Amino acid sequence: MTAFSSILCVGNSWFPTMPGGLNRYVYELIHHLATVQDKIELCGVGLPETSPNYPIKLTNLAEPNTPILQRLWSTRNNFLKRQSTNPDAINLHFALYSLPLLASLPTEVPVTFTFHGPWALEGEREGAKKLSVWVKHWVEQTVYNRCDRFIVLSKAFGTILHQEYHIPWSKINVIPGGVDTSRFQANLSRQEARSQLNWPQDRTILFTPRRLVHRMGIDILLSAIASLAFGIAKIKSKIPDVWLAIAGKGVLRDSLEKQVTELGLHNHVKFLGFLPDEQLPIAYQAADLTVVPSQSLEGFGLIVLESLACGTPVLCTPIGGMPEILTPFSPELITEDTDAVAIALKLEGLLSGKIPIPSRYACRDYAATNFNWTKIAQEVRQVLLQS
């Protein structure tokens, strides 16, 4: 491994303008790799113009609002036109925009794919048509067959990569995601954070930032909240007044609002819509508990790390990589199952004091010690530059 290396990354879109776990991961990874003076180039769709002294070279391959075939054609042509020498390592992050580039990648340079999730399987779970699912799986498998090694953010997604795409475990490296502990931090009191967001000061607040799609489990969480809010008097008397803040957009917004009406939860649930990125650390700090009720395909659980870094404990379902984060820290924060009963039982235990909740300091210290980006980026770099 050379002292300073050249690393080419192929991502999806630019994080500050296009939110999402994959985009955020790539954005933070490349900036932390750049701090060790490696030469970093990111290719993607919808990337901005930057100043000459920007530490990372950005190559915009296409515009995101163009038709898909035109976008892929532009991706290939603009990649071939770029002025750059061969890198020491190539790191692909998104199969769709990697596919047109495969024939142009230098054969002598190792290619690592960072597997953020099964694109085809996610579409299938959300009701995509069979042809769409087949095409996505073909794209993924074609790209993966060209790669030398893989990074997954959890053993759970390593298992999916192995079983669904037949990648041998010998090629799979498990490296968890990182969290920007300078941005996600416990620098406000709960009261100060609530004041900034105009949230209630006198209620127990649960927070969940999620896309409003089926596998995220927001409908299940609403049913759990209803059982807490309107449970039998003996149980209800032990539970503080709960207010659930839901941040995110998605196709289920109307049906979830209808569910809130049917369950009589208007006084207990607030749909925030899209929450600006700068307000996300404030929202974590304003909450007593972050809840992640995922039902399937939660490969890592970046929300878990972000909340812990802000000093707020997280309750999650036993799905994907989330238990891998929480089990060494506080296994009591993982529900027994994914259904509303299991979530409600765990919430009842936590909110009534029967289950101890980790302190703000303990949450922050665990995230900062084990998942800070400086540490994670070095682990990724070692895999990328393996000879």
Image: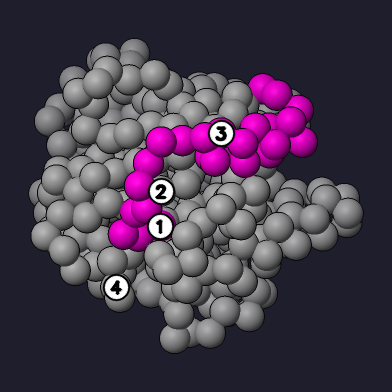
Q: Which residue is mark 3?
A: 78
Asked if marks 4 and 2 touch (Cβ < 8 Å), the reply is no
Residue 191, visible in the rendered structure? no
Q: Which residue is mark 4?
A: 386
Point out the tag, 4 or 2, that comes first from the N-terminus. Answer: 2
Q: Amino acid at mark 2?
A: Cys
Label 2 sits on a secondary structure element that is: strand
x, y percentage for residue 171?
45, 80
Specify which label sits upstream in the sequence, 2 or 3: 2
Closer to the chain start, of discs 1 and 3, is: 3
29 w.r.t. 120: above or below = above
Q: How many marks?
A: 4
Residue at x-position 15% and y-position 27%: 188
Q: In 3D space, how far apart are the residues under numbered discs 2 and 3 (Cα atoms)?
A: 15 Å
Q: Is residue 110 visible?
A: yes
C-alpha span from label 4 to label 3: 28 Å
Residue 230: x and y, percent? 57, 41
- Residue 109 in the image: state x and y as whole percent: 40, 65
Category of crowding for the residue at label 1, using alpha-carbon neighbours closer than 10 angstroms: few (below 14), some (14–19), many (at least 20): many
Task: Please provide the residue range marked out in magenta.
Answer: 65-90
